[in-house]
């Protein structure tokens, strides 16, 4: 296991790549979900237009 | 019933909500399979050692960074030609995901370049044009947030996106047109791949993961954008989920 994590001496580069990519994905998913919730709250609070 | 029905935000909103979880699930499956192949099965590279395993995230994100831009350009052309709201919303939803893919491609490229080329960064044609792509995504997003009227922002962003798409063939062919530190394409449609087939398989599975992920997250984002921009429309007020959100 520790041999696997060491990545033949390239741990910083390999895990630095995958770690930042994982963080980017998590941040994107969390922010999109927050945006959906905020948009739904805003839409729910908006009085619908009366059909003309 | 035709596909044109779904050019209306009211019809597309529930469809997007229905499709997104399936694409997210497919992305998760492909990621697990791709990482298993990439880290569990694919052997150590005889020249680069373990450092080459960055390929399984670098190449898919770099492909997606360009592909997302092309899709954004496609929706921008439709938005300008037919003045359809949903096309512009799709383009709007794609930009942040494209920017993230571009950032990941640049970041992983730097971390791969250091052990293999001896430098994190060089101003060669491939890297510079990819950096310009990141700025194009930022530019489109900044332009949108700078214009209050969403319909005017749609047109302005569409024009900028279409003009900026000239950068995509420059990125793709940069390694042929100029003498770059970045290597040429290892995989192309016209020649046999220049890499071991198990490594290629891992890369392709991870590419599918990136595709499915991008589709899922863009569908979720376009739902948020539809709600933001269509709020006040009668159909939005009738959404069952919104009713429960107020109650």
Image (cartoon, coloured by chain):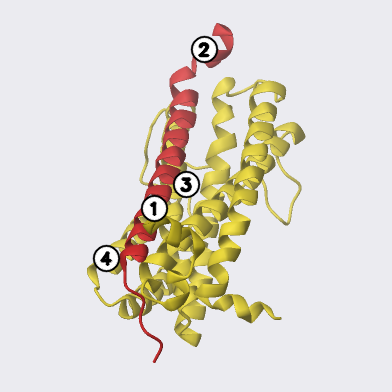
Chain colours: A red, B yellow
Rendering coords of residue A11 (x, y %): 48, 18
Q: Is residue B91 above or below residue B54?
A: below
Find numbered disc 4 in the image and state the secondary structure of the residue it sits on: helix
Find numbered disc 2 in the image and state the secondary structure of the residue it sits on: helix
The quarter of the picture where the C terminus of chain B appears is bottom left
- Label 1 or label 2, whichever comes before in sequence order: 2
- Label 3 or label 4, whichever comes before in sequence order: 4
Name the residue rendered at 38%, 47% in the picture: A31
> How crowded is the residue under tag 2: few (<14 C-alpha within 10 Å), some, or many (20+)?
some
Find numbered disc 3 in the image and state the secondary structure of the residue it sits on: loop
Rendering coords of residue B113 (x, y %): 45, 33
Give the spatial CA distance, label 1 vs label 4: 20 Å
Give the spatial CA distance, label 3 vs label 4: 36 Å
* Same subunit: marks 3 and 4: yes
Q: Identify the subunit bearing mark 4.
A: B
Q: Which mark is residue B180?
A: 3
Q: Identify the subunit bearing mark 2.
A: A
List the residue tagged with mark 2: A6
* Same subunit: marks 4 and 2: no
Residue found at the very far bottom of the displayed protein: A52
Nearer to us: label 1 or label 4: 1
Residue found at the very far front of the displayed protein: B247
List the residue tagged with mark 4: B145
Callout 3–callout 1 Cβ contact below 8 Å: no
Nearer to us: label 3 or label 1: 1
List the residue tagged with mark 1: A37
């Amino acid at each position: 296991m520790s041999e696997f994590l060491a990545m033949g001496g390239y741990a910083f580069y390999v895990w630095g790549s995958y770690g930042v990519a994982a963080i980017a994905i998590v941040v994107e998913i969390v922010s999109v979900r927050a945006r959906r919730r905020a948009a739904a709250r805003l839409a729910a609070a908006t009085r619908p237009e009366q059909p003309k | 019933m035709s596909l044109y029905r779904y050019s209306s935000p009211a019809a597309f909103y529930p469809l997007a909500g229905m499709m997104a979880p399936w694409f997210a699930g497919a992305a998760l499956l492909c990621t697990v399979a791709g990482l298993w192949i990439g880290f569990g099965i694919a052997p150590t590279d005889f020249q680069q050692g373990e450092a080459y395993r960055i390929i399984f995230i670098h190449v898919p994100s770099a492909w997606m960074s360009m592909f997302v831009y092309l899709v954004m350009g496609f929706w921008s052309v439709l938005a300008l030609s037919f003045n359809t709201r949903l096309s512009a919303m799709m383009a709007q939803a794609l930009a942040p995901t494209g920017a993230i893919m571009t950032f990941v491609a640049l970041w992983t490229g730097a971390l791969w370049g250091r052990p293999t080329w001896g430098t994190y960064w060089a101003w060669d044609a491939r890297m510079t044009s990819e950096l310009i792509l990141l700025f194009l995504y930022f530019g489109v997003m900044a332009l949108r947030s700078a214009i209050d009227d969403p319909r005017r922002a749609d047109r302005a962003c569409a024009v900028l996106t279409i003009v900026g798409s000239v950068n995509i063939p420059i990125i793709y062919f940069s390694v042929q047109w100029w003498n770059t530190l970045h290597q040429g394409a290892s995989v192309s449609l016209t020649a046999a791949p220049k890499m071991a087939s198990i490594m290629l398989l891992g890369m392709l599975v991870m590419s599918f993961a990136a595709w499915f992920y991008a589709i899922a997250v863009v569908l979720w984002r376009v739902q948020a954008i539809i709600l933001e921009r269509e709020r006040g429309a009668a159909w939005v007020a009738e959404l069952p989920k919104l009713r429960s959100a107020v109650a």
